Image (tube, helix red, strand yellow):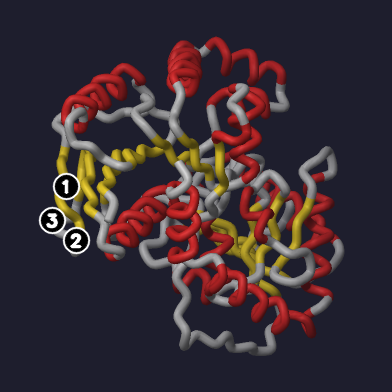
Amino acid sequence: MKKIAFIIKLFQSNSFHGGGEKLFYNIINNFAKDGNLVDIYCSKSDVDNLQGINKIIVIDKIYDHTEPETMEIFYDEIKKLVSNSEYDYIISENITPSIDITFLQGHSLVHRQRKLKNLFESFLYNFRSVKKKRIKYQQKWLQEGYRKIFVVSNVLKNDIITNFNIPEDKISVVYPGVNVSCEFKPEFKEKDHIVFGLSAPGFKIKGGYILLKALYLLKNKGYKFKARIIYPKFKKNLWVKFLVKLYKIENNVEFLPLQKDMKSFYDSIDCVVIPSLEDTFGLVALEGMSYGKPCIASLNAGASEIIQEGCNGFIFKLDKNAFKNFAEKMMFFMDNKEDHEKYSKKSIETAKFYSWDKTYKDLLAQLSVL
């Protein structure tokens, strides 16, 4: 039995805001079920009691990643509380003040700045005082050093190595997971069009504009298709509205609000798309695969690392012809309907392999050698 502390912003059992919260909930749940003594330090929790959890400590301090000073105050309080607790591992989330071990799910701000193609945008990014301050603190925390850094993909690992000169042996990739119903069997029905699905709360960074332009190309080539896009701010984004009309794809695209239950979304599509400009993983890829939906992803998405070209999905490069590269993969998928059942079966196999149990075991194996 190990004694483990987790330091996170939110500890929730449902209504997750993103893949990071799912990741930590499932890791914590597996550690608890495995008989370890688990303590949680957080700023907020909707969990009163979870079987196997020793205690949940809600810290009455502000936790705001946009204000690094609040993070230091929050973590200073944690340091006092854990100083004499003799934990085997203290695992925190993302780039935060270092205590012991961290598990990163998001790119560094330095990476985002350097990935901006527009020089003017990059210049403004560097001189925005809030961003500049946060970059300074991220560099400070990483240089202070963690005993170990875990990341969700090699895409993220390369970010930390390249931008912060962290030794490669300090960083290990542990992919996130998904749950798959053993009883699930995909049904195949004849359709007059293929439906692509994109989850893009952050429209630009998730490749929303690349998708619209790719759909424009498909439309001009006479393909029949639909695209369902989760983008809550669509009604306020006049530029997106303009492009949809300009590309004459109003009847092909449906914009959706945030989905409380993603099952109906995955059931309604044939293929998940992740044309992200940056995406450390993209858990919707695995979630879609758990429903038998293959994935088309850009190489900038960490999920591309679990995609086998032509088996459980397709990968495309983000260069000056990104939308054409993307559209070619979409057209190939539509042109080869006879292979959809094969893609679906391979997708489910992938989802079953990358289970939350595997995530836990991979993390445990890495911790055991520290």
Q: Nearer the viewer, mark 1 or mark 3?
A: 1
For the question of whether residue 235 can be seen, the reply is no
Depth order, front residue of 6/296: 6
Checking the image for residue 264, the label placed there is none
Would you say the residues marked 2 and 1 are in contact, meaning their CB atoms lie under 8 Å apart?
yes
Q: Where, quadrant-wise, is the N terminus in this rendering?
A: bottom left
* Residue at x-position 54% and y-position 29%: 108
- The amino acid sitting under disc 2 is Leu
- Across and down, in percent, residue 59 comes to 16, 34
Q: CA distance from mark 3 to mark 2?
A: 7 Å
Q: Measured along the vertical axis of the image, is residue 213 above or below residue 133?
A: below
Would you say the residues marked 3 and 2 are in contact, meaning their CB atoms lie under 8 Å apart?
no
- The amino acid sitting under disc 3 is Asp
Badge 3 marks a residue whose secondary structure is loop
Badge 1 marks a residue whose secondary structure is strand
* Residue at x-position 49% and y-position 49%: 366
Depth order, front residue of 32/164: 32
Q: Measured along the vertical axis of the image, is residue 314 above or below residue 352?
A: above
* Residue at x-position 72% and y-position 27%: 117
- Across and down, in percent, residue 81 comes to 16, 30
Q: Measured along the vertical axis of the image, is residue 14 above or below residue 277?
A: below
- Across and down, in percent, residue 4 comes to 28, 46
Residue denoted by label 2: 50
13 sits to left or right of 277: left
Q: Earlier in the sequence, mark 2 or mark 1?
A: 2
Checking the image for residue 56, the label placed there is 1
Crowding near the residue tagged with mark 2, few <14, some 14–19, many ≥20 C-alpha atoms within 10 Å = some
* Residue at x-position 54% and y-position 73%: 352
Q: Where, quadrant-wise, is the C terminus in this rendering?
A: top left
Residue denoted by label 3: 48
